[in-house]
Amino acid sequence: MATQKTKNYTQFLELRSEIDRFDLELTKDFKSQLSIVPFLSRKVVSFQGNKDKPAYNWYKYKEAFSAGLVAYFLSSYEGGIQGTVLDPFAGIGTTLFAAKEQNIHADGIELLPIGQEIIQTRLLLLKGLTSVEIATLERWIASQPWKECPERVPFSTFRITEGAYPSETAEAIERYKGALQQETEKIQKILCLALLCVLESISYTRKDGQYLRWDARSGKMRQGTKPFNKGVILPFASAVTTKLKEILSDVTSHKTPTTLFPTVQTESSIRLFKGSCLEILPTLETASYDAILTSPPYCNRYDYTRTYALELAMLGLTHAEVTSLRQEMLSCTVENREKDLLKICSNWSPFIEAANNQKLLKTINTYLEYEKAAGTLNNNSIPRMVRGYFSEMACVIGECFRVLKPNARLFMVNDNVRYAGVGISVDLILSDIARTLGFEVEKILVVPGKKGNSSQQMGTYGRVPLRKCVYVWRKR
Ligand SMILES: C[S@@+](CC[C@H](N)C(=O)[O-])C[C@H]1O[C@@H](n2cnc3c(N)ncnc32)[C@H](O)[C@@H]1O
């Protein structure tokens, strides 16, 4: 027994030192590409940078990056680009709308219906509003017609969203949905956008990375957890009318050169592909894009289908649809099952092999399996998630390489992560895979001031800084 224990401990030490060695080797290998860039503040690489930007700040998508970041890489970086940019993980469309401002065509792929809805409604608004439409929205703001509406249209809920609103708010939402049926399709879309934008603020919940946090006033406390108070829960009427006013003012304001209506109207177009980029990328034409600018989900266990459950329920998705959506998302939660990547595209063997043969990743995978067998992981599906994340990302990278024109660049924002006490250099591993698949790794731009890791990890292993980077790869 003791011998077995010693053997196990020796294996543990060997794996840890191998990980350190391969990580150091890769760090040395990419030494001349790694550089800290003061311009890339946390604000610029995150939604924070959009806080004061009209239209970009309507819906708080915490996972978004800023329009300023897009402008920098598409217009300033190394002379900028012309032509068409692609974002395979488009979110709420920051790349698409910010590219349009630079007169660059943009294609986006997005799987999550809330992102799709925000993009589609913003696209509708790009066409502007007629005086009748403006008058209709003003009437909604001034006289709040839902209050008198006898018809109530119920909204769906899932187990994790039941009881999310105070009862008077739930009733007001149903009447609002009832009243908006009288309006044109475009007005309905705008009213629905305003509703989606305020859901969190009128609910008992707060988006919190891996899940929805519940305010104690909901009566839905989990046993053994500290009572949580999210602060003011806005009444429905004031929240939704404030949002409608904001949207209306941004769309109709000619004083401020809003990002929605740039002073110079550009002719460039935006196309949205709805679905998984794993399915859609293989259908795109080879060598057709002048740049790719994207930020995939990070390998951090964040589950978008839970975080955005209120919005998905309001959009009418069923529990079964959300469950299947979760599996279609790029694997980054412990609930993702392994995807049959070769079934999606039979040409992907070299991409999957590139991930399987990456030395550092291979050792990390062995180490995580070892920790799983030892019973020390806080979730036994972490090894599957990490393996899935890199295999799927290798396929995305391979496809991105194919659809880029020669010499075109790919810019990717991503975070490193940490599991079982081991930092995973996502930046180095993905860059090495990209290099194997034909990219030249031009730069790995590091965001100044490193980020800590999850509270669980910090408690167990102490605060270890993790890099957040923008990778710049070029198709040679
Ligand atoms: C980090 S966010 C990108 C945010 C975006 N840069 C923005 O500013 O709004 C990653 C996005 O990838 C989407 N996503 C996850 N899996 C996907 C898949 N298989 N295909 C397409 N999009 C996916 C998520 O829904 C999420 O919106």
Image (cartoon, rainbow, N blue to C red):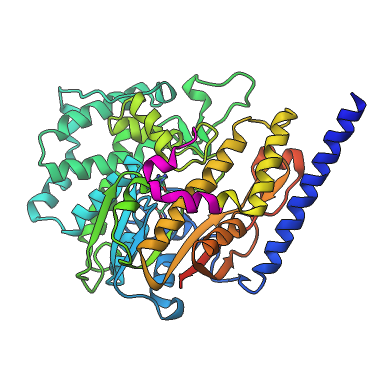
Residue ranking furthest to the bottom: 79
Q: Residue at x 49, y 24 (%)?
A: 217
* Residue 73 location, quadrant: bottom left
Q: Main secondary structure of the magenta part?
A: helix
Q: Is residue 278 visible?
A: yes
Locate residue 436: give its quadrant: bottom right
Would residue 60 be visible to someone looking at this image?
no
**Residue 156 position within the rendered picture, expressed as x and y whole percent measured from the top left:** 30, 24
Can you name the residue that lies furthest to the left here?
A: 132
Query: 156 above or below 114?
Result: above
Q: Residue at x 49, y 67 (%)?
A: 439
- The boundaries of the magenta stretch are 337-354
* Image: 174 above or below 451: above
Counting the numbered discs, the total is 0
Look at the picture and state if 152 lies above or below 89. above
Q: Is residue 296 left or right of residue 199?
A: right
Tell me what residue is drawn at x 35 percent, y 41 percent.
Answer: 112
Front residue of 190/349: it is 349
Determine if the magenta segment contains residue 87.
Answer: no
Q: Is residue 196 left or right of residue 472?
A: left
Residue 300 in percent (x, y) is at 56, 43
Nearer-the-camera pick, 355 or 294: 355
Please state if 91 lies on the left or on the right of 433 as rendered. Answer: left
Quarter of the N terminus within the rendering: top right
Give x and y (percent) for residue 291.
38, 68
Q: Residue 205: horizontal and vertical position, in percent?
A: 46, 32
**445 or 160: nearer the eye?**
445
Q: Is residue 343 magenta?
A: yes
